[in-house]
Image (cartoon, rainbow, N blue to C red):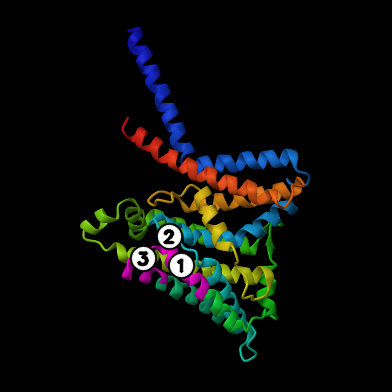
Amino acid sequence: MSGNIEQTTEAKESSFWDKLIRISMKEAGVTIALVLILIFFSATAPYFATPENFLKIFVQIAINTVLASGMTFVILVGGIDLSVGSLLALCTVIGATIMVDPRLSPWQAIILASLASMGTGAVLGAINGWVCEKWKLPSFIVTLGMLNVASGLARVVSDNSTITGLPQPFVDFGNLIFWDILPSIFLIAVVVVLIGWFVLRYTVFGRFVFAVGTNEEAVRLSGHEPKKIKIAVFTISGLTAGIAAMVYLLRLNVGSPVAGIGYELNAIAAVIIGGTSLSGGKGSIVGTLVGACILQVLSTGLQLLGADDNIKPIVIGAVIVLAVILDSYRGRLMRILETR
């Protein structure tokens, strides 16, 4: 009798630890890490735990959150998109050029600029995906090429100059703050995340994204075409680059051909830290949002602690490497738990 009780107790304990490991390997684990970082900086960094500082953080993560949302789709199928920063720059100068056109009313200019920015990003993203699939080229190489193409086009369109004088209603909306802590551009980023979360979790397309990342050959053998899914995810990445360009214009009120330099690396970092596997098939767009928050909280917290500017990239780089290492162990742990 006592033996049965001991076995039952051990089974419960094993089940508890299995559940704990599963939770820590998913979005909850990344969220716990964010909470711990927040607690640490709140206790050690002056003025960190203030509404003004959190407002600043929300403003600064908006662009990266939008870019990283589209990047999540690409990485989930095992790809990478290095062109999003340059696409953002191109879309900002296209959007700004349209908005300063004197022949258009402010609202006509804003609507046309938004459509042109998102459309340009989506078309160039689709070209990325099509070239990758047409000639079976690594996405790293193709998007690296598009990075240079889009950067050059941004300089040509803008004539190597920044574009200012955006419509006042557009500027006013970018300066809106809700409930004294949530900027309008952060709410745009949240809407993008929610749409991406719904697509990945509740649509057939979302299930195919995970399936292609997990086992592309199985998807093909089931009678479906992975090529279409891959082109679609690059199109989504380009589309979110166009949306991020409008967020950039809302925040800084200028179109610049050098905007977005290094943004692609920040977006990839947010996705990886958020728990999406570089090998594809596992991840979450909510985790990506948390990853973007971790990056910015680390940067802001270190700044308030008085850390040297040279120290911040070292810490953030170490966090990225740690996230990749944990990703490899996460896969092993999950396979072990699935066989128990």
Mark positioned earlier in the residue sequence (2 or 1): 2
The Cα atoms of the two marked residues, 1 and 3, are separated by 10 Å
Residue 74 is marked as: 2
Quick one: which residue is furthest to the top in this view?
A: 2
Q: Where does label 1 land, which residue?
A: 143
Residue 103: x percent and y percent?
A: 62, 92
Residue 33 lies in quadrant: top right
Q: Earlier in the sequence, mark 3 or mark 2?
A: 2
Q: Position of residue 223 (x, y in %)?
A: 21, 60
Which mark is drawn over residue 137? 3
Q: Identify the amino acid type marked 1.
A: Thr
Q: Main secondary structure of the magenta part?
A: helix
Q: How many marks?
A: 3
As measured in the structure, the alpha-carbon distance from the residue carrying label 3 to the one carrying label 2 is 15 Å
Residue depicted at 47% across the width and 70% down the height: 145
Residue 45 in the figure: left or right of residue 138? right
Q: Amino acid at mark 2?
A: Val
- In the rendered structure, which segment of residues is drawn in magenta? 128-149
